[in-house]
Image (spheres, coloured by chain):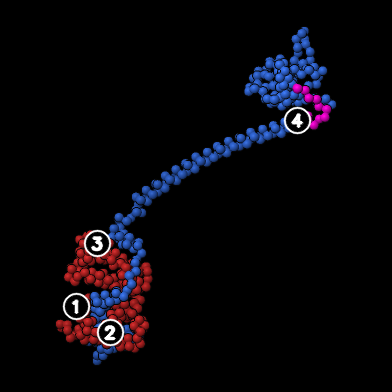
Chain colours: A red, B blue
């Protein structure tokens, strides 16, 4: 049985479907929690919160899942997980990339008006594969630039300049292609 | 005057030093154009982080880690808190009652066992006392026998029934001033009866005169003997007092 059908059944109150989705995705969600939160206990709590939220809001996810296909159910679960982990990090005020109060406020405002998923995907596809990976890793995990330099085996200055270039390139692409 | 995009991008990415960031934030307070640009760049960074391709790319390198099994159980408890509440009040009450009954039964059992053990202990004590008594009697008999057997001048006389059956023997220590004779019979008296020795001094108008010397429930005993012509051994009923021998077993003529 595919993920879309499972989510649909969960939306109709079939709890066995939740057990099946947990069976399929919990190991990755847990690994994500461990990586982002660096704590077993917090990763376990995050895992619970993620699937609890999935259970409670399965109905609202169903439409999206049906529209975007099977892979998106997993993506949905992982994005819930990431948000849960980020929330925990914010609560602790220990996000690896030291964010200022102003940036926090701007992030909250930005979250209310997200950029269209298809548009950002298009913009990302226009980047070189290495720059794309670098920018995705940096923004997804919140890695510091020195961590990225180590992971990619690049000088720190190169990482910084590539990230800057990638971000501005995305900005320019969106400026040129988004309806004003 | 607005700042270059490069500087704003560096700020969003956290590359600036705290001093540079502080100076720029002061500018952002008054410059709407730069603030909008920063917000745009923040939106882009969020959109990149949440893009499906980002999730797929980052998760593909992530090695799955199986979470602890109880994590699923905890999730189920959150979903059905009532179903998973084994320690609710009724359960606690039931468990308490069960514990009480178990401890009561255990208490009764141990009490019964204790009583049984006490009874056994008492029985053993009684047996021990009996054995000690018997040992004491045997010791007394041994000392008694020793006293007579070690006497060189002791005289041994076989006690015979009228029919000539040997019933035991008697020992007299002639040289000693001891006025007691030892009686050593093969068997103790029958149940409910005792041995009795009688002194015989002579007849009164053709009728023998007896007077009682010693009564014994044992097979080995002593009896006075001096000053009589004969000793008569009889068995008597324990609950009866008689003046003359009831059943004469043997007569020992002394002089």
Instruction: Please indicate whether residue B148 sits to the left or right of residue B120 in the image.
Output: right
Dot 1 and dot 4 within a common chain: no
**Numbered tag placed on residue A131 in the rendering:** 2
Cα gap from disc 1 to disc 4, whole angstroms: 125 Å
Query: Which residue is located at x 56 percent, y 38 percent?
Result: B120
Quadrant in the picture for the N terminus of chain B? bottom left
Q: Is mark 1 on a helix, strand or loop?
A: helix
Cα gap from disc 3 to disc 2, whole angstroms: 39 Å
Q: Mark 1 lies on which chain?
A: A
**Numbered tag placed on residue B145 in the rendering:** 4
Closer to the camera: disc 2 or disc 1? 2
Query: Which residue is located at x 82 percent, y 29 percent?
Result: B152
Query: Which residue is located at x 29 percent, y 72 percent?
Result: A82
Circle 3 is placed at which residue position?
A: A17
Circle 1 is placed at which residue position?
A: A118
Q: Is residue B168 highlighted in magenta?
A: no
What segment carries the magenta color?
B147-158
The x, y position of residue A68, in whole percent, is: 19, 71
**Numbered tag placed on residue B103 in the rendering:** none
Crowd band around label 1 with a 10 angstrom C-alpha radius: few (<14), some (14–19), many (20+):
few
> CB atoms at circles 1 and 4 under 8 Å apart?
no
Cα gap from disc 3 to disc 1, whole angstroms: 29 Å
Query: Which residue is located at x 68 percent, y 19 percent?
Result: B235
Front in this rendered view, residue B34 or A74: A74
């Amino acid at each position: 049985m595919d993920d879309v059908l499972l989510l649909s059944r969960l939306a109709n109150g079939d709890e066995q479907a939740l057990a099946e989705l947990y069976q399929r995705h919990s190991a990755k969600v847990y690994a994500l929690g461990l990586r982002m939160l660096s704590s077993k206990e917090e990763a376990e709590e995050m895992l619970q919160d993620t699937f609890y939220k999935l259970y409670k809001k399965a109905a609202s996810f169903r439409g999206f899942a049906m529209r975007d296909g099977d892979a998106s159910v997993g993506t949905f679960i992982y994005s819930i997980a990431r948000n849960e982990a980020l929330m925990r990090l914010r609560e602790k005020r220990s996000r690896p990339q030291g964010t200022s109060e102003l940036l926090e406020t701007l992030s909250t405002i930005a979250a209310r008006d997200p950029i269209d998923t298809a548009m950002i995907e298009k913009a990302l596809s226009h980047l070189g594969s290495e720059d794309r990976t670098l920018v995705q890793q940096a923004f997804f995990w919140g890695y510091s630039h020195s961590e990225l330099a180590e992971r990619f085996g690049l000088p720190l200055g190169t990482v910084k300049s590539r990230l800057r270039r990638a971000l501005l390139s995305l900005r320019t692409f969106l400026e040129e292609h988004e309806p004003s | 005057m607005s700042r270059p995009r490069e500087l704003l991008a560096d700020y969003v990415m956290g590359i600036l030093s705290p001093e540079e960031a502080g100076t720029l934030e002061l500018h952002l307070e008054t410059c709407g154009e730069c603030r909008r640009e920063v917000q745009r760049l923040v939106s882009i960074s969020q959109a990149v982080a949440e893009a499906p391709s980002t999730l797929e790319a980052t998760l593909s390198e992530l090695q799955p880690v199986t979470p602890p099994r109880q994590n699923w159980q905890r999730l189920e408890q959150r979903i059905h808190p009532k179903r998973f509440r084994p320690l609710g009040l009724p359960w606690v009450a039931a468990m308490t009652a069960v514990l009480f009954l178990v401890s009561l039964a255990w208490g009764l059992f141990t009490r019964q066992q204790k009583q049984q053990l006490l009874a056994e202990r008492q029985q053993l004590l009684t047996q021990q006392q009996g054995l000690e008594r018997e040992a004491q009697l045997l010791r007394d008999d041994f000392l008694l026998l020793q006293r007579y057997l070690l006497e060189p001048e002791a005289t041994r006389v076989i006690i015979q029934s009228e029919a000539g059956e040997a019933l035991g023997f008697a020992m007299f220590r002639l040289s000693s001033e001891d006025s007691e004779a030892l009686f050593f019979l093969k068997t103790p008296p029958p149940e409910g009866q005792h041995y009795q020795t009688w002194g015989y001094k002579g007849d009164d108008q053709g009728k023998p005169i007896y007077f009682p010397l010693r009564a014994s429930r044992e097979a080995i005993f002593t009896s006075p003997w001096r000053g009589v012509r004969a000793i008569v051994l009889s068995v008597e009923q324990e609950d009866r007092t008689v003046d003359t021998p009831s059943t004469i077993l043997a007569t020992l003529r002394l002089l």
